[in-house]
């Protein structure tokens, strides 16, 4: 009886944790698209880092989104590699405080010298630069996943500055976003 109660309790806990995630994903109305990256497909050299042994264009892909929920006051955009051999993944891009009236960015908008609208800025990526940093997995590794996500935020500005890490941006975005949409591209070498 004791083991049965434990199984029932663990099952209830698992359901309480997983159900909201499943329901949230199923009810998502936001859509994200790009002319430069395609869901599940290999990224072009334009989105590959220039350095660390890689020789790419280091351009953030064009992104276009729609379906942000009512109450959206800003957007956060991230690019994250969960497969990086760091124990914590790799943050390639974290763009915050993008005004709610913006619904697309051209290729290269993650460059240091790109004129971002409003109070938007790039937080520090894991290359230690306030910009987009392209894909550059270890040579010979299986292709990595690069998850580009746009988050609809209920705040106009996050309580951070340019010294914030991608992980800190991810913390705020994942915990407070009204909705989100992602594209996962791949790259290996």
Image (tube, rainbow, N blue to C red):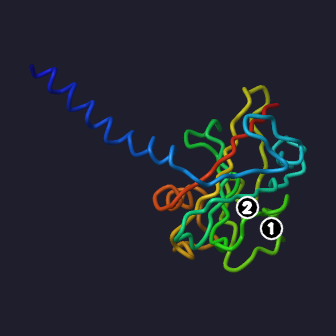
Classify mark 2: helix, strand or loop: loop
Above-or-below relation of 8 to 162: above
Label 2 to label 1: alpha-carbon separation = 8 Å
Name the disc covering residue 129, or none: 2
Residue name at image x 82 percent, y 31 percent = 189
Name the disc covering residue 112, or none: 1
Whether tag 2 and tag 1 are in contact, CB under 8 A, the answer is yes
Above-or-below relation of 102 to 184: below
Name the disc covering residue 161, or none: none
Earlier sequence position, callout 2 versus callout 1: 1
Give the number of marks: 2
Residue name at image x 62 percent, y 63 percent = 76
On the image, which quarter does residue 119 sit in?
A: bottom right
Residue 109, given in percent of the width and then of the height, sits at: 81, 64
On the image, which quarter does residue 161 sit in?
A: bottom right
On the image, which quarter does residue 138 sit in?
A: top right
Residue 20, given in percent of the width and then of the height, sits at: 40, 46
Residue 177, given in percent of the width and then of the height, sits at: 51, 60
């Amino acid at each position: 009886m004791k083991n049965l109660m434990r199984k029932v309790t663990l099952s209830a806990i698992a359901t309480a944790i997983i159900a909201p995630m499943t329901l949230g994903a199923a009810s998502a109305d936001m859509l994200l698209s790009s002319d430069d990256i395609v869901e599940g497909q290999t990224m072009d050299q334009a989105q590959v880092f220039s350095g660390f042994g890689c020789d790419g264009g280091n351009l953030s892909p064009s992104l276009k989104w729609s379906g942000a929920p009512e109450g959206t006051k800003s957007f956060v955009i991230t690019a994250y590699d969960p497969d990086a051999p760091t124990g914590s993944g790799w943050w390639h891009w974290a763009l915050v405080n993008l005004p709610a009236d913006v619904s697309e960015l051209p290729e290269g908008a993650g460059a240091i010298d790109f004129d971002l609208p409003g109070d938007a800025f790039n937080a520090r990526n894991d290359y230690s630069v306030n910009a987009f940093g392209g894909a550059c997995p270890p040579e010979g590794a299986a292709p990595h996943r690069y998850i580009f996500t746009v988050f609809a935020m209920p705040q106009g500005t996050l309580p951070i500055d340019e010294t914030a890490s991608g992980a800190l941006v991810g913390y705020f975005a994942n915990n407070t976003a009204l909705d989100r949409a992602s594209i996962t591209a791949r790259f290996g070498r």
